[in-house]
Amino acid sequence: MSFQPSRRAAEIETFKVMDLLKRAKQLDRDGYDVVHMEAGEPDFSTAPEIAEAAKIAIDDGLTQYTPAAGIPELREAISQWYQTKYGLDIAAERIVVTTGASSALLMIFSLLTDAGQSFMMADPGYPCNRQFLRFLEAKSQLVPVDAEHNFQLNEHLVSDYWQDNTSGVLLASPANPTGSVVDRETMKRIAQEVKSRGGSLVVDELYHGLTYEGEAPSVLEVDPDAFVINSFSKYFGMTGWRLGWLVAPAEAAPELEKLAQNLMISPNTVSQYAALAAFKPSTIELLEQRKEQFRLRRDLLVSGLRELGFSIPVMPEGAFYVYAGATHVTDNTFDYCWSLLEDDHIATTPGLDFGRHRCNEFIRFSYTTGIDRIETALERLSKRIRG
Ligand SMILES: Cc1ncc(COP(=O)(O)O)c(C=O)c1O
């Protein structure tokens, strides 16, 4: 090698699904009809009014840096969103606009975790969290969760796994890869448990808006001191615009702003002006119609997979993923996903990407593709399994 990578960089893991993704794209290019159920992003393009607002911002020359915590109009609009959606008064000063939830997570972990400390989170979970903590010379403290836990932490698990060096707890609700939601009472009890131990609670609410059995509660309804991560990526359909936000207790906001100045200078300017259109009633109406599409897809996929023997004991309540147990067809879902791709041209994500706990038993299917494509995937799976 012409350079010596740092130990820190060398130990950062890649997404296992990346090679599979690359191969899926190659099969596309070679003319195969691949059903894409591996993606973690909506297949719908960004709502027209958001795109239009971006064009206007460019034409108006709004292309320079903004304040590190975001333009005041957007912080105000997000504050108003909490009022409209949750009936919560969240001062705009507590909101920091970020370059996606990704940088919000990095900033919050940087704020709350010293080298050698650990942050508690569910296994399976979103893979980057573990890498962010590794990057900070801190540790991810993975707590195995199963369907009997609704694939989420609870106050008992938090208490059982708490260590002297635990600085906080991260929840994701709805979660990636399981789509599970933490209910209000459980959230409240977790918040109390974390507080009683002097730790911080961070909740990744990135998939809020995409829930199919009623709205997911925000942790801010039960704990005003919690940190919240959110993003324009998923419900608002703006993955490529790289825009998110965090909500912090008032006294933490200046610290986070300081981190934002250094890590990003500012979030993407054009994206911020575009996002102002995300809260327009006409945009929300469109996003709600899309949500209904997701619900239909979820229902079709879950019942089809269950019919084929996949284990989905808990109905995924949100996001756009089904985390299906596949022990009836394999004891190694990593290899199985590869052969699903090569032989049946169905691209999925193996459990191995989301942690260690029973990861060889699960496959994540994303329903970020149309009903007809989900039907095609189910037909191919049926042929494979039933012959
Ligand atoms: C649970 C979770 N958190 C954070 C992210 C990062 O999202 P973004 O940086 O696009 O806002 C993702 C992306 O898939 C995710 O699933």
Image (spheres, rainbow, N blue to C red):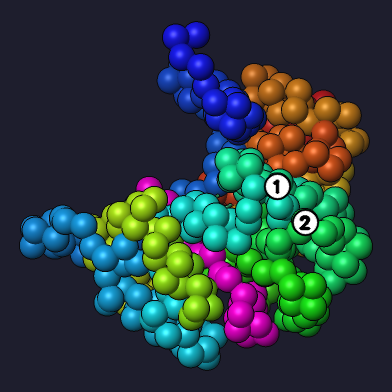
Labelled disc at residue 89: none
- Picture coordinates of residue 83 (x, y %)? 46, 88
Residue at 21% over, 57% down = 65
Relative horizontal placement of residue 171, taking residue 36 as reference (left or right)? right
Residue at 71% over, 61% down = 167
Q: Nearer the viewer, residue 179 or 342?
A: 179
Q: Main secondary structure of the magenta part?
A: loop
- Picture coordinates of residue 12 (x, y %)? 60, 32
Residue type of the residue flagged with mark 2: Asn
Residue 309 part of the magenta-drawn span: no
Camera sees residue 316: no
- Picture coordinates of residue 306 (x, y %)? 82, 49
Residue range in magenta is 216-240
Total marks in image:
2
Q: Which residue sits furthest top?
A: 1
Q: Which residue is mark 2?
A: 165
Q: Residues within 10 Å of mark 2 (few under 14, many from 20)?
A: some
Looking at marks 1 and 2 on the same chain, the residue that comes earlier in the sequence is marked by 1
Indicate the secondary structure of the residue bearing disc 2: loop
Q: Which residue is mark 1?
A: 116
